[in-house]
Image (tube, rainbow, N blue to C red):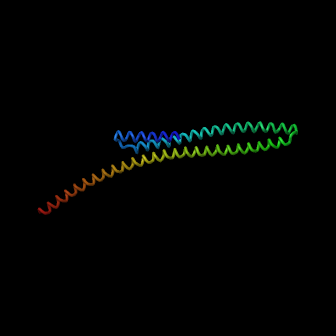
Amino acid sequence: MIADQILVMKIFYLNLKTFFMGKSNIRYQLTNLIGQRKKKIYETEMANNASELGRLRNLVKELEEREVKLEGELLEYYGLKEQESDIAELQKQLKIKTVEIDMLNITINSLQTERKKLQEKIAHGASIKKDLEVARNKIKELQRQIQLDANQTKAQLLFLKKQVSGLQARSHQK
């Protein structure tokens, strides 16, 4: 929300700057601001994903430690053969925690997959940008070559016209 307010303030500032300075490059500046905003959102998402991933890993570790602890308590109860209802409850909790661990592992895998996809999109975008630049350079080179060929062809055509005119003039003189 604060980032949106900052963006609105920057747009207002650019409008005032453009009005007083008489420059009309606001579209470029807005595009630049939007690009910066998208980059900031992406970076924030990546940071949030990394933070969430770390938190989930810590939670998995805590839950695994707790699972070990619960298993120890369960063995103790089996050894004492007392309080069978407590044993059943601990088994239920163990199952619940195992399900939670499984769900957290699924979440971790999902976040890792999403992160990998985002990294692939970034790499693909960079590759496309590079290919586009190569294509633009090739087009410029081809346009230069076409212009050169056209100029040479015009020169040859003028030369041939002069020769034909000279030959026609000679044939009329004879």
| Place of residue 16 in the rendered image (x, y in percent of width and height, measured from the top left) | 39, 40
Taking the view exactly as shown, the residue that stands out farthest to the left is: 173
Q: Write the residue at 35% across / 41% down.
A: 23
Q: Left or right of 135: which side holds 70?
A: right
| Place of residue 78 in the rendered image (x, y in percent of width and height, measured from the top left) | 85, 39
Query: Looking at the image, which is closer to me, 141 or 130?
Result: 130
Query: Looking at the image, which is closer to me, 37 or 103?
Result: 37
Q: Write the residue at 59% across / 45% down.
A: 114
Taking the view exactly as shown, the residue that stands out farthest to the right is: 81
| Place of residue 65 in the rendered image (x, y in percent of width and height, measured from the top left) | 73, 36
Q: Left or right of 120: which side holds 91?
A: right
| Place of residue 98 in the rendered image (x, y in percent of width and height, measured from the top left) | 73, 43
Q: Left or right of 62: which side holds 83?
A: right
The C terminus sits in image quarter: bottom left
Which image quarter: residue 168?
bottom left
Query: Looking at the image, which is closer to me, 66 or 174?
Result: 66
Which image quarter: residue 161?
bottom left
